[in-house]
Image (spheres, helix red, strand yellow):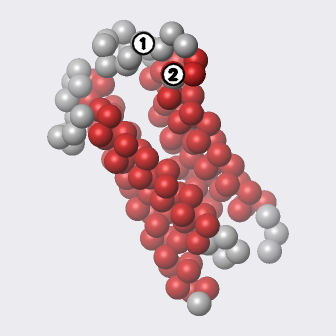
Amino acid sequence: MQTKRKIAAEITVSIAFIMLAVYVADAGIARLNNGDGFIPLSLKDRGMILGGGSIILFLISFGIGFNIKSKVITTLLIVGGALMAIAVIIPTFIIPDNSDMISDTSSPSSDPMLGIIIVGFIIMGLGILRAVRKK
């Protein structure tokens, strides 16, 4: 039973990481090409499908593999959460974009970027929790 759960959790976290990596690559290319990435979706749709899907799959993989030892799950949770947070921090705060791709963020409550950063650190924290927790 645990072998099936381990395999299911590892496949799920791998799919989540691939989705996140594709999303980050597409967002980077879209930023360089003024909005034209290699995936023919709008900015909102890309974020909801690839970004949101990867978040859900990361959390599902953590739940499936909760009491199972797996370096793959632990590593991909840590790296995926860090990638998610860093991929938002760098373009938002370090290299600000002055184009009209980002909506008016005059109030902090309307800024979804902070939420994505927090979710990325939560996913990374779940991976760190798996690494330090003794079985």
At label 1, counting other C-alpha atoms closer than 10 Å, the crowd grade (few under 14, some 14-19, many 20 or more) is few
Are the residues flagged by discs 2 and 1 in contact, CB closer than 8 Å?
yes
Say whether disc 2 or disc 1 marks the residue closer to the N-terminus.
1
Q: Which quarter of the picture shows residue 17?
A: bottom left
Taking the spot 26% from the left edge, 29% from the top edge, the residue there is 30
The residue closer to the viewer here, 72 or 43, is 43
- For the point 39% across and 55% down, the residue is 18
Which residue is label 1 attached to? 104
Q: Is residue 28 left or right of residue 17?
A: left
Q: Nearer the viewer, residue 53 or 16?
A: 53
Pick whichever, 72 or 54, lies toward us.
54
Pick the residue in front: 16 or 21: 16
Q: Residue 9 in the image: state x and y as whole percent.
A: 53, 71
SS category of the residue bearing label 1: loop
In this picture, residue 29 sits left or right of residue 1: left
Kindly identify which residue carries mark 2: 110
- Mark 2 residue type: Ser
Residue drawn 52% across the image and 18% down it? 93
**Residue 101 x %, y %:** 31, 19
User: In this view of the protein, can residue 17 be seen by the observer?
Assistant: no
Q: Residues within 10 Å of mark 2 (few under 14, many from 20)?
A: few
Residue lying at 48% horizontally and 14% vertically, measured from the top left: 105
Q: Position of residue 103 (x, y in %)?
A: 38, 17
The N terminus is located in which quarter?
bottom right
Q: Amino acid at mark 1?
A: Asp
* Position in image of residue 62 (x %, y %): 60, 64
Q: Is residue 116 above or below residue 1?
A: above
Left or right of 56 on screen, residue 132: right
Q: Secondary structure at mark 2?
A: helix
Q: How many angstroms separate mark 2 from mark 1 (CA)? A: 8 Å
Left or right relative to 132: residue 56: left
